[in-house]
Image (tube, rainbow, N blue to C red):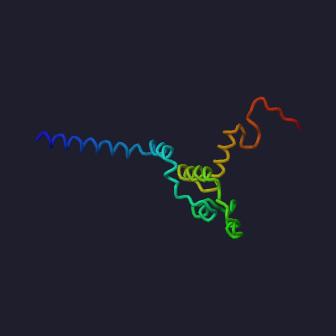
Amino acid sequence: MADNYILWSWAFFFMVLATGLYISRSRWIPFLSNIIPEHAYHRLNPSFEGDIEAGLSSDAFSLSGNVQDGDHRAGLDVASKKEVLRIMKSQKVNFDDARQLFMVQKLAKNGIAPDGRPMDPRAVFFS
């Protein structure tokens, strides 16, 4: 009798926990992708063909010329590919918008405004 009570209590607890996690998934899923980024993108093919297959090409940023010329380099930078793919997935934008957001973030991290001017208040400009 007591065993059934404990079993059903645990079952109820896990159902409530699973329901709570499902309802609040928009809050905790972004943190999950930051914990295991290497495992999520281990299948990225290090070539320009792999980059095109992963969706990292567009009309404005075409890699087809590299493939047609027989370029055998390793493709785009792996860390940048991961970050652009993360932006595309998390913000649901296309490749060009994700690439622009990535560059704005990278420039801001280095103290550069999106228009190319330094954000340092001590910067002096001459005309």
Rendering coords of residue 76 (x, y %): 65, 56
User: Which residue is drawn at the image coordinates 37% and 46% (left, top)?
Assistant: 22
Task: Looking at the picture, tell me which residue is in the foreground, 16 or 33.
Answer: 33
Question: Is residue 118 found left or right of 126 in the rendered image?
Answer: left
Residue drawn at the location 64% of the way across and 61% of the way down = 57
Q: Is residue 89 left or right of residue 70?
A: left
Q: Is residue 125 above or below residue 100?
A: above
Q: Residue 122 at x, y = what percent?
A: 78, 29
Q: Please, is residue 52 above or below residue 118 in the view?
A: below
Residue 31 in the image: x percent, y percent? 48, 42
Q: Is residue 99 above or below residue 12?
A: below
Q: What residue is shown at x 21% (from left), y 40% (from top)?
A: 9
Can you name the residue that lies furthest to the right here? 127
Q: State the image quarter where residue 3 is shown.
A: top left
Where is the N terminus found, in terms of image quarters?
top left
Residue 11 in the image: x percent, y percent? 24, 45
Quarter placement of the C terminus: top right
Q: Is residue 125 toward the left or the right of residue 8 in the image?
A: right
Q: Residue furthest top?
A: 122
Callout count? 0
User: Which corner quadrant of the image does residue 26 belong to?
Assistant: top left
71 vs 21, nearest the viewer: 71
